[in-house]
Image (cartoon, rainbow, N blue to C red):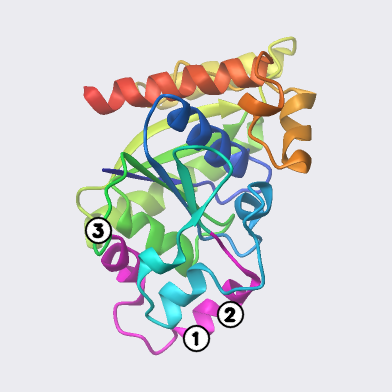
Amino acid sequence: MSIIAIINQKGGSAKTTTAVNLGATLAENGKKVLLVDVDPQGSSSKWLRCANTEKGIYNVFVENTCISDNIKETSIEGLTIIPSSQWLIGVEKALAAEVGAETILKRKLAELKRDWDYVLIDCPPALGLLSLNALVAAHEILVPLETRIMALDGLAQLLKTVEMVKDRLNPELKINGIIPCRVDKRTRLSVDVIDELKKRFNGMVYDTCIRETVKLAECPSFGQPITIYDTKSPGAEDYRTLAAEVIRRKKI
């Protein structure tokens, strides 16, 4: 079972878009996928029509419930989710006196009785306690990165945090890869940023690029991944290519 944290502390980086669509395309490849939404905004949960008035993953962090009791089915075969809720906004305050609060998610995922091929953790756009839990629990991180100059500075800060977590809390953590997202190859800027990424982070950057398309922006409103909303679109093609690359990297 590969546990992958999909993380970027910058908003608008296609993090949730990648979590949902990668989960769907891995499931399309016959993989069992569990998506864990630890973002208080609950975008993945809303997208997959699994947001509700229950506390979801908050129960796992604060009320010590069994993680399996919070798993929900989605409309996509092979893809399940542990939904987020607005209760997560208060999780840091609730756990302020908790010893080892940063290891809760890791301990809870270890209790899973059913095996998945992939557990994808959709992280919040901030490097707080919830993201720290994801980094401690994960085997690898996947970084969706908007192809804009300012995004490179945020990436450098994120990688410093990853190295700190690796040194102190999770020595097995590694960087699975960086995924250029919202790419418009008609502009020189996107091409330049991808070139700079490959220069700075040799070997970390995925061959797959996720192109900027209207269909990708539309599909959350319909509660569907891009592979169902518009199965022949460039976005569907890109995420299928990404899934194949993720599977191939796991085998290496």
Residue 146 can be seen in this image = yes
Relative side of 207 to 209, left or right? left
The circle on residue 94 is: 1
Q: Residue at x 62, y 56 (%)?
A: 50
Magenta portion: prevailing SS class: helix
Secondary structure beneath disc 2?
helix
> Residue 169 is drawn in which quadrant?
bottom left
- Residue carrying label 3: 113
Percent position (x, y) of residue 146?
A: 63, 33
Circle 1 Cα neighbour tier, 10 Å, few/some/many (<14 / 14–19 / ≥20): few
Q: How many marks?
A: 3
Instruction: Please state which amino acid type lies under the numbered disc 1.
Output: Ala
Is 85 a magenta residue?
yes
In this rendering, which labeled residue sits more in front, label 3 or label 2? 3
Relative side of 129 to 239, left or right? left
- Magenta stretch: give its range: 83-109
> Residue 18 is drawn in which quadrant?
top right
Image quadrant holding the N terminus, namely top left
Q: Residue at x 71, y 21 (%)?
A: 230
Is 201 a magenta residue?
no
Image quadrant holding the C terminus, namely top left
Secondary structure beneath disc 3?
loop
- Residue carrying label 2: 90
Secondary structure beneath disc 1?
helix
Circle 3 Cα neighbour tier, 10 Å, few/some/many (<14 / 14–19 / ≥20): few
Relative side of 119 to 213, left or right? left
